[in-house]
Amino acid sequence: MIQFKGALVIGALIGAAAGVLLAPDKGSVTRDHLKKEGKDIKDQISSDFTEVKDDVSKAAKSGKDKLKEEIKDIASKTSYQTEKAITFLEKQLAILKEKNKTLQQTS
């Protein structure tokens, strides 16, 4: 998209230069025409720059939102794994308690 717009700007500049070289009008008319063309090109470049800036901003926001979502997913998965680990440890602790009870009864 950016390359296409750059090509349009370069094409406009080449067209303006060709217009000067081939202009049948008086110098003052040609200069006025060039001023107008220059302003139009400047306005177009400004508009294109704003559009590109907006696109980049949207992409950055989208990436930020996607990253937040991925972090939530990772946190959720980590929480489930933590829960499994806690359950395993609780079972092992229960087994150890039972073994400890049998040792206490035999003494």
Image (spheres, helix red, strand yellow):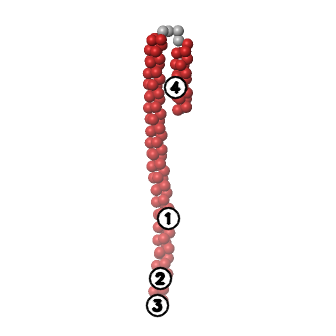
Dot 2 or dot 1, earlier in sequence: 1
Q: What residue do we see at 46% from left, 11% from top?
A: 29
Residue 56 visible in image: yes
Query: Which residue is the site of mark 1?
Result: 84
Whole-Å distance between the Cαs marked 4 and 2?
83 Å
Label 4 SS: helix
Tell me which amino acid carries mark 1.
Answer: Lys
Q: What is the residue that sits farthest to the front in this orientation?
A: 27
Q: Are marks 1 and 4 in contact (CB under 8 Å)?
A: no
Considering only order in the chain, which callout, 2 or 4, is on the residue closer to the N terminus?
4
Mark 2 lies on residue: 100
Q: Residue at x 48, y 50 (%)?
A: 70
- Counting from the top left corner in percent of width and height, residue 61 is at 44, 42
Q: Residue at x 53, y 9 (%)?
A: 24
Q: Are marks 3 and 2 in contact (CB under 8 Å)?
A: no
Between disc 4 and disc 3, whose residue precedes?
A: 4
In 3D space, how far apart are the residues under numbered discs 1 and 4 (Cα atoms)?
A: 61 Å
Q: Where is 56 relative to 11, above or below?
A: below
Whether tag 4 and tag 3 are in contact, CB under 8 A, the answer is: no
Q: Which residue type carries mark 3?
A: Ser
Report x, y in % for residue 49: 46, 31
Q: Is residue 13 above or below residue 28?
A: below
What is the tally of numbered marks visible in this picture?
Answer: 4
Task: Indicate left or right for 15 with 79 as reference.
Answer: right
Q: Calculate the distance from the C-alpha at mark 3 to the C-alpha at mark 2.
A: 11 Å
Query: Where, by quadrant of the figure, is residue 4 drawn?
Result: top right
Dot label at residue 9: 4
Disc 3 target residue = 107
Is disc 3 surrounded by few (<14), some (14 to 19) or many (20+) residues within 10 Å?
few
